[in-house]
Image (cartoon, helix red, strand yellow):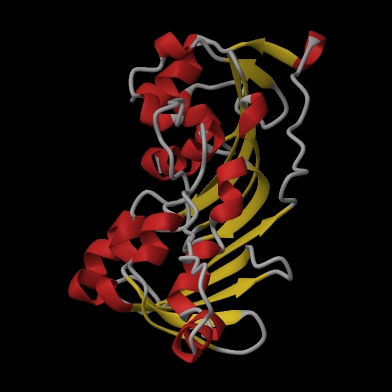
Amino acid sequence: MKHAFGRAATLIVAASVIFGAGACADKNDGAATPGAAAASSKAPEPKDVLAGALAEYEKGVYSVDFAGLDSTGQAAIDTPKKQAYLKIGGSGQGFSITMEVLLIEPDAYVKLDLGAMAEIYGVAQGNGKTWMHLDRSKVKDAESLGLSADETDMLDLKALLQSAQSVQAAGDRKYKGTLDLAKGAGSPMTDEDVIKALANKAASVPFTATLDAQGRLAELLIDVPAAGDKKAHQLKLTVTQYGSATVPAKPTGNAVIEAPATVYGFFNN
């Protein structure tokens, strides 16, 4: 569970997210030939349209909702201000955990709702009510919180969509095809055990992408087949509030405490 949280929490520290794809046309100062006119009017390939839909990510301000096999989450990113917020919930056999992480450089905060696991971990503050200020130097594995600024593709969307094959238009602003799920191993939507169980089948998993009226990625659905003891399920990612996402304010006063040793133990064990 810690590693699933770590993959998702890396969303909050993006310095920039997703490289867009573009194309430049050559200009001809002379009279245009019929062949050139035909080429310039040719519709772009569906795969190129899909890649170009990621360009807005470069600005790094947006909100995300996502759902995986056993987890759901939301995030708000404002890279220019170096602020981000993540909430993710996961469940297993007889337990559920929710974690919120708030990054407002240079500070980081965490809120945990460990349910019955709070007593097992000895984390009295794991009731989902208290923000805790973190000393990053005390977190042994930075990936367990995602507190790292050296990642550029937090959602693994660039790698996922670059792996897309057989991309076709599938209706109004919709595109379908297959992609290599293993390229998104670091995405909050994916599960490492599922990718391993799929083996070679992970290289051609069906997807449907929907763009908004401005040509930006709005929704990505990935239909993961059953494999091993993992049931078939759908991964879903929606992106909204381009350029206007708001990160919660820094907690102050009685709303925040310094994280106790037991909280660091939760992440470091």
Vertical placement of residue 95 versus 204, above or below? above
Image quadrant assignment for residue 215: bottom right
Taking the image as shown, residue 2 lies to the left or right of residue 72, namely left
Total marks shown come to 0
The extreme front residue here reads 30
The extreme left residue here reads 200
Task: Report the front residue among 36 and 49.
Answer: 36
Q: Work out whether residue 257 can be spotted.
A: yes
Q: Quadrant of the C terminus?
A: top left
Residue at position x 49%, y 69% in the image: 28
Residue at position x 72%, y 14% in the image: 256
Taking the image as shown, residue 160 lies to the left or right of residue 117, namely left
Residue 1: % across, % down: 41, 43
Q: Work out whether residue 234 can be spotted.
A: no
Task: Report the front residue among 16 and 204.
Answer: 16
Task: Report the front residue among 38 and 193.
Answer: 38
Residue at position x 63%, y 17% in the image: 132
Residue 47: % across, % down: 44, 75
Taking the image as shown, residue 162 lies to the left or right of residue 263, namely left
Residue 161: % across, % down: 41, 65
Vertical placement of residue 44 versus 65, above or below? below
Residue 51: % across, % down: 47, 65
Task: Report the front residue among 188 and 242.
Answer: 242
